[in-house]
Image (tube, helix red, strand yellow):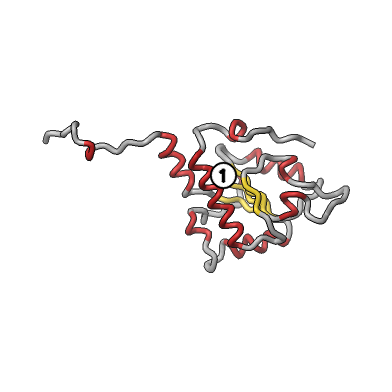
Amino acid sequence: MAVDLESPSNFLTTRLRQAVNWGRKYSLWPLPFGTACCAIEFMSTVSSYNDISRFGAELVRFSPRQSDLMIVAGTISYKMVPILKTVYAQMCEPKWVISMGVCACSGGFYKNYGTLQGIDHIIPVDIYVAGCPPTPENLLNGLTQLQDKVAREGLQTADSRHARPAAGR
């Protein structure tokens, strides 16, 4: 059987980066780091009514070694900081972080000595989802924004993806 190499219908051309990122975009494995009321909204997002699996993120894992997306949902106290940093460090590359809710994004109305004023002081954040608590639709919007970001990325590690490295406290 002769193969016609002149005909473009015999070839599928793409860049390796595009093919890999297409797979990453639709196979995110989230790790919920829920500490407050935002975690309840995350539970609603994975329910059958809102159905996060439509977006390719249905395999919720509770082990950082099996996850590539951490969703930090809720207030983070300074006592939780070492745990958050350890869990993030245990995740495999490439990895992404969604900061869900005003408390995770900026400390919320807990402006005191015991509350971290945004998780971006500790770990790099890819997407911020606003709300107190954010609705499931808002979280799904943040997930689609992350998918768009994943599709545009190169084949590099998380350290080179973020403009500034995470600062330790």
54 on left or right of 11: right
- Compared across the picture, whether 113 is left or right of 27 comes to right
Is 56 placed left or right of 82 in the picture? left
Along the viewing direction, whichever of 154 and 40 lies nearer the viewer: 154
Q: Are there few (<14), some (14-19), or many (20+) residues within 10 Å of tag 1?
A: many
Percent across and percent down for residue 35 are: 73, 56
Q: Which quadrant holds residue 34?
A: bottom right
Q: Where is 37 relative to 81, above or below?
A: below
Q: Residue furthest bottom?
A: 49
Q: Residue at x 51, y 46 (%)?
A: 148
Q: Residue at x 70, y 55 (%)?
A: 101
Quadrant location of the C terminus? top right
**Percent of width and height locating residue 115:** 82, 49
Q: Is residue 132 above or below residue 92?
A: below
Q: Amino acid at mark 1?
A: Asp
The front one of 98 and 31 is: 98
Q: Residue at x 59, y 43 (%)?
A: 96
Residue 41 placement (x, y as % from top left) = 65, 63
Left or right of 27? Residue 99 is right
**Residue at left offset 50%, top offset 33%:** 155
Nearer to us in this view, 9 or 64: 9
For mark 1, give the secondary structure: loop
The residue wearing badge 1 is 68
Image location (x, y in percent) of residue 132: 72, 60
